[in-house]
Image: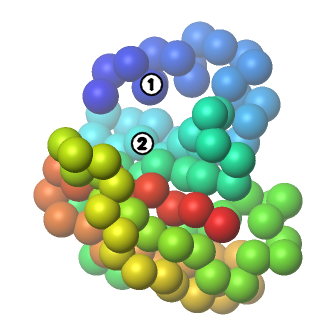
Amino acid sequence: MQVAPWRYRRNADAAKAGTAPITDDEVVCPTLWRDRTIVAYNRAGFTGRRMRVPTHWVDVTQVKLSRIALDGLAGRGCVPVDDGVVTLTADDDQAIVISA
């Protein structure tokens, strides 16, 4: 959990990749190794969390959600993108991968 905040706070190139809101309990950042993919995490989880997708995803009408598990990604289905916003739900200590 401490590596991502450290990298984004100290690496100007990573910050250029998109908005990376980071607090002690939450990280929402692009994956630099996968195109059009974001990871969202909150220690307390979230319900009905509205999140704006990057502006260069203008052609995206739905996103695929996956849960990060010990044995890889576990599919969670798709959600619509409504005017550039997705609505997410995740359990406590669960990271979600959002892919266009």
Q: Position of residue 2 (x, y in %)?
A: 32, 21
Instruction: Tell whether label 2 touches label 1 (CB within 8 Å).
Output: yes
- 15 with respect to 95 (left or right): right
Q: What amino acid is found at the position of numbered circle 1 in the picture?
A: Pro
Q: Can residue 20 be seen in this view?
A: no
Residue at 69 percent across and 28 percent down: it is: 15
Nearest to N terminus: mark 1 or mark 2: 1
Residue closest to the eye, 87 or 39: 39
Q: Is 59 placed left or right of 67 in the picture? A: right
Describe the element under mark 2 as helix, strand or loop. Answer: strand
Disc 2: CA contacts within 10 A as few (<14), some (14-19) or many (>=20): many
Q: Is residue 11 visible?
A: yes
Which residue is tagged 1? 5
Q: Quadrant of the C terminus?
A: bottom right
Location of residue 53 by image quarter:
bottom right
Whether 100 is drawn above or below 26: the answer is below
The colour style of the image is rainbow
Residue at 51% in and 62% down: 98
Mark 1 Cα-neighbour bin, 10 Å: few <14, some 14–19, many ≥20: some
Using the rendered view, name the quadrant where residue 91 is placed: bottom left
Residue indicated by mark 2: 27
Residue furthest to the front in view is: 71
Is 8 situated left or right of 77 in this image? right
**Residue 84 picture location, percent across and down:** 71, 76
Pinpoint residue 16: horizontal percent, then vertical percent: 78, 31
Mark 1 to mark 2: distance in Å? 8 Å
Taking the spot 57% from the left edge, 23% from the top edge, the residue there is 8
Determine whether the residue tagged by mark 1 lies in a helix, strand or loop: helix
Question: Which amino acid, mark 2?
Answer: Val
Q: Where is residue 5 in the image (x, y as percent from the top left)?
A: 44, 25
Q: In this view, does 43 lie to the left or right of 84?
A: left
The residue nearer to you, when weighing 69 against 83, is 69
